[in-house]
Amino acid sequence: MFGMGPTELVIILVLVVLIFGAGKIPELGRGIGEGISNFKKGLREGSDDKLNTSDRLPSASDAKDAEKRA
């Protein structure tokens, strides 16, 4: 994983515990998890918007097509 061995991962874990404290680690994990789920939700909503084309703004090609019909 990223060229890191178990020794490096243990050192990073110890540093995180020293910096944030053991009590803050669950809060950090929860915040990261919520951020990831909100990001995924936003991606899903964005793809749903693309599927619903009736609400989209007219594009330049739509204007050209309207001019041709007129």
Image (cartoon, rainbow, N blue to C red):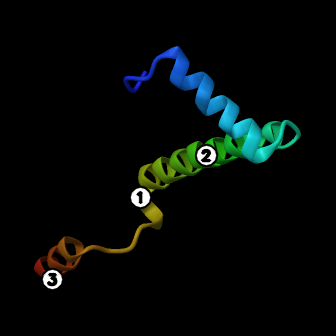
60 or 27, which lies in front?
27
Q: In this view, does 57 lie to the left or right of 70?
A: right
Q: Position of residue 3 (x, y in %)?
A: 37, 23
User: Mark 3 or 1, which is nearer the eye?
Assistant: 1
Q: How far apart are marks 3 and 1 (CA)?
A: 21 Å
Q: Considering the numbered disc 2 on the image, is that residue within a helix, a strand or a loop?
A: helix
Q: Position of residue 30 (x, y in %)?
A: 77, 40
Residue 67 marker: 3
Q: Are marks 3 and 1 in contact (CB under 8 Å)?
A: no
N-terminal of the pair, mark 3 or mark 1, is 1
Q: Where is residue 67 in the image (x, y as percent from the top left)?
A: 15, 83
Q: Which residue is drawn at 42% across and 67% down?
A: 56
2 or 51, which lies in front?
2
**Total numbered badges shown on the rendered structure:** 3
User: For the residue marked with disc 3, what is the amino acid?
Assistant: Glu
Q: In this view, does 22 lie to the left or right of 17?
A: right
Q: Residue at x 69, y 39 (%)?
A: 16
What is the quadrant of the N terminus in the image?
top left
User: For the residue marked with disc 2, what is the amino acid?
Assistant: Lys
In the picture of the structure, the residue carrying the numbered disc 2 is 41
Q: Where is residue 21 in the image (x, y as percent from the top left)?
A: 82, 42
Residue 53 marker: 1
27 or 57, which lies in front?
27
